[in-house]
Image (tube, rainbow, N blue to C red):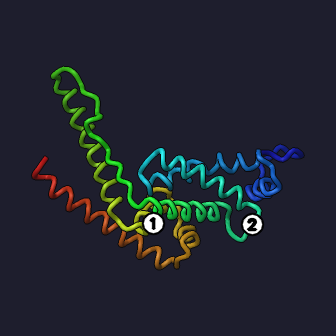
Amino acid sequence: MKRAEDNQPMEENEVVKLAQQGDKEAFSVLVRNYQNKVFGLAINIVRNHETADDLAQEIFIKAYQSLPRFRFQSEFSTWLYQIAINHIRDHLRKHKKEKNDLRLDEIPEISGEEKEASEQLANRQEEEYRKRLLREKLEEMPEKYRLILSLRDIQGLSYEEISKMLKLSAGTVDSRLHRARRLLRKKLAQALGQEGGKR
């Protein structure tokens, strides 16, 4: 959105204020600005595209309904992420764990016996195997570790932002992230070591 008088992009807080006053176009701007980030957070936690899409829509509905209560005491993004985190946690509590294994047999067959084609298929299978393994090991981790890995390593948020969202000290964020990374590396190393002799 742009200011009518000078044709310059509006500051985010101005857009938020317009949305609070019922301007649907202003809220649409906020949705466009944050929909990929909210969806990304959801899918990194629930590991299911359709569920993450539903959650993202529900999160923006909650944000719209709660918008009149936003007091600009934090960044809008921090406030929105807090709503997202709480909503995703509620979903996890209601639905427990939902495993969604990636099926390797869905990789298309490559006809012919050329060496190059065989290598491409092998590489693709290896890549899909590693993605599936990473998802499985993330799924096995406690929610607090999955969440902090998603916010920091996948979403790229700063320690300060994560600290505000999770209501943790910067030191706690740092130590929890360190433990989460170490646990994930250990799980991956164990799995790769065990699978090495089988594959």
3 with respect to 183 (left or right):
right
Q: Amino acid at mark 1?
A: Ile
Q: Quadrant of residue 84?
A: bottom right
Q: Which mark is residue 69?
A: 2
Relative vertical location of residue 96 with respect to residue 50 in this rendering, above or below:
below
Q: Which mark is residue 124?
A: none
Residue 126, image x, y percentages: 24, 43
**Residue in view at x 54 percent, y 52 percent:** 55
Viewer-nearest residue: 84 or 96: 96
Residue 114, image x, y percentages: 17, 23
Q: Residue placed farthest to the front in the image?
A: 94
Residue 125, image x, y percentages: 25, 39
Viewer-nearest residue: 173 or 57: 57
For the residues labelled 1 and 2, the Cα–Cα distance comes to 27 Å
| Quadrant into which the N terminus falls | top right
**Residue in view at x 69 percent, y 51 percent:** 30
**Residue in view at x 73 percent, y 56 percent:** 12
122 with respect to 103 (left or right):
left
Q: Earlier in the sequence, mark 1 or mark 2?
A: 2
Q: Secondary structure at mark 1?
A: helix
Q: Amino acid at mark 2?
A: Arg
Q: Which mark is residue 148?
A: 1
Are the residues flagged by discs 1 and 2 in contact, CB closer than 8 Å? no
Q: Secondary structure at mark 2?
A: helix
Q: Residue placed farthest to the right in the image?
A: 5
